Image: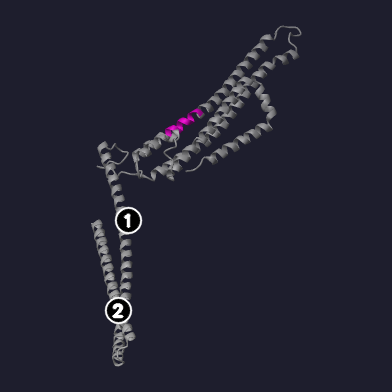
Amino acid sequence: MTQPSSYLTRIVIFLVLVLVVIGVLHEPVIAAFMTNPVLNGLIIASLLIGIGYVLRQVLSLRPAVRWVETYRRNEPGLSMQAPPEMMSPLATMLQEKKGRVSLSATSMRSLLDSIGARLDESRDMTRYLGRLLIFLGLLGTFWGLIQTIDAVGNIFGGMSVGGGGGDTSFDDLMVRLNGPLQGLATAFSSSLFGLSGALVLGFLDLQAGQAQNRFYNDLEEWLSSFTRLSSGAGGIADGDASVPVYVQALLEQTADSLENLQRIMARSEDARASGNQTLLQLSERLASLTDQMRTERDLMVKLAEGQMELKPILQRIAVATEQNGGDSNADTHLRNLDVYVARLLEETSTGRQQSVDEIRSEIKVLTRTIAAIADEGR
């Protein structure tokens, strides 16, 4: 959405230029104003009211733009903010729709027409003030002309057409001419202020209209991004004829069902990806168990080889002991060695059984997981 700051800057620059021109020409402007202060003051007051109203129109677009941007970014706390008066129809419709928003072409057109009507309604006052300035300028013109005609009539009525040196001197004629000149000054000054004020207010209204049209176009582009077009039924296109209510309701229900189906498929895809990840982790664990089993098997083989190597040594020791007459210390060492070997064999068999039990439990867990994933897939 485009902010109305650029149009507001143009308005401020134009008003500054107008003030500069008035400052340069302040002496003739003050003289023209003093010819009829009441009427000219009314014209200037109407101009100031129109300028304030135009600034209010442009500044009122900022809350609407901020509200739309907040909704587009899906920022929290939007429901706590009161929508601008201009955006109340759109806010009501968007709050009624939960989840992904989707509008029909008819709904979008009705929304845009409502917002456009509100924008046009806000400019009616500015248009009226512009016409009022022109009217006040023409009113002052006709008033001044009436004063001029009245003063001229009094001059001619006071003049004598008889003989003699004349009842009216040249100085008296110049004094009497002040009346028509005052009337002409009133006419021209009021026309000057009225037309100048209408020119200034017209330019400001033009900038306000451009700002509102820019906002309207941006809003239309945003609404068209989630507006679905109906292909029509029976050769009737949307907008050429009214669609029955039950057909529209059926189409909306079908669209909602398709959206729900799309969400379900997305969740299924996420579950399938999670299942694949789980299978990959189980495969890695099976690989690590296989490596562990291989390591334990190699260890058992080495232990068996060690026992096979130890058996001839024990036999030689036993033979040597018998030949030496049976040393009690040697017999004790042999019995201890025999106990140690038996204990080693027992621990080896116990470790082997534990490894087998762990592998069986892991295989059971893997089987159950694969069965659960297969059930979810079905």
Q: Amino acid at mark 1?
A: Asp
Q: Nearer the viewer, residue 200 or 154?
A: 200
**Circle 2 residue:** 339
Q: Assign the magenta stretch its main secondary structure.
A: helix
Whole-percent x and y of residue 143? 59, 18
For the residue pair 155 and 293, the one nearer the viewer reads as 293
Residue 330: horizontal and vertical position, in percent? 33, 86
Residue 97 spot, x, y in % from top left: 35, 40
Real-space Cα separation, disc 1 to disc 2, in angstroms: 59 Å
Label whose residue precedes the other's in the sequence (1 or 2): 1
Q: Which mark is residue 148?
A: none
Among the 4 quarters of the image, the one containing residue 114:
top left
Horizontal placement of 183 versus 215: left or right? right
Residue 322 among those drawn in magenta? no
| Residue shown at 33% from the left, 44% from the top | 229
User: Residue 9: x and y, percent?
Assistant: 57, 39
Q: Quadrant of residue 279?
A: bottom left
Amino acid type at image mark 2: Val
Along the viewing direction, whichever of 351 and 110 lies nearer the viewer: 351
Secondary element type, mark 2: helix
2 versus 54 height, above or below: below
Horizontal arrangement in the rendering, residue 194 relative to residue 294 (left or right): right
Q: Which residues are magenta?
A: 116-125
- The label nearer to you, 1 versus 2, is 2
Q: Which residue is mark 1?
A: 270
